[in-house]
Amino acid sequence: MLIKMGEDPTREGLLNTPARVNESLRFLTSGYRMNADDLLNKALFDVAYDEMVIVRDIELFSLCEHHLLPFFGKCHVGYIPNGRVIGLSKIPRLVDMYARRLQVQERLTTQIAETINQKIHPRGVAVVIEAQHLCMIMRGVEKQNSVAVTSSMLGVFKENQNTRNEFLNLVRHQPK
């Protein structure tokens, strides 16, 4: 790749670049070597709680599968338990597991929601991702301030406008 760019791979600053890129890509795609069952193991609890649980502003970093360029932003996850909850720290870990794969934002959003839905069978799940894509910022249309927003609403979040609105209002960025 360095040679095709017109670079000299024997140049001092580039001598270790192939190894660094390899290590970086292994980390950025480490989600392929994880699975949700292992990640959530021992963090699913029977709890008599039936109000909305939200973890918002989860930082995420992923690689666009079309250009291998990063996209990054915030993920907001909410669910309404139906007798079971997930340990709160497991939600950002689940986001990272799927984000650390070659992705499109739409699939990432759906994977997070569907996994939570399958693992604890809540009354509903809502996931919203707001992200900036370097493939749109650095190249292509070159729109520096564009933000892509995707959502996945399952169960009561899809069926009930009031529930959906409550979630969206709670994750909306409020001025400080």
Image (spheres, grey):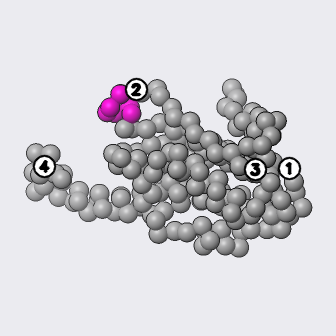
Is residue 27 magenta-colored?
A: no
| Residue 4: mark in rendering | 4
Residue 169 position in % (x across, y down): 75, 33
Crowd class of label 2 (few under 14; some 14 to 19; many from 20; radius 10 Å): some
Instruction: Measure the C-alpha gap from mark 4 to mark 1.
Output: 56 Å
Q: Which residue is mark 2?
A: 143
Residue 145 position in % (x across, y down): 46, 26
Crowd class of label 3 (few under 14; some 14 to 19; many from 20; radius 10 Å): some
Q: Which residue is mark 1?
A: 51
Instruction: Measure the C-alpha gap from mark 3 to mark 2.
Output: 35 Å
Say whether marks 4 and 2 touch (CB < 8 Å). no
Under circle 2, the secondary element is loop
Q: Earlier in the sequence, mark 4 or mark 1?
A: 4
Residue segment shown in magenta: 136-141
Q: Which residue is mark 3?
A: 155
Residue at 41% x, 27% y: name it: 144
Q: Earlier in the sequence, mark 1 or mark 2?
A: 1
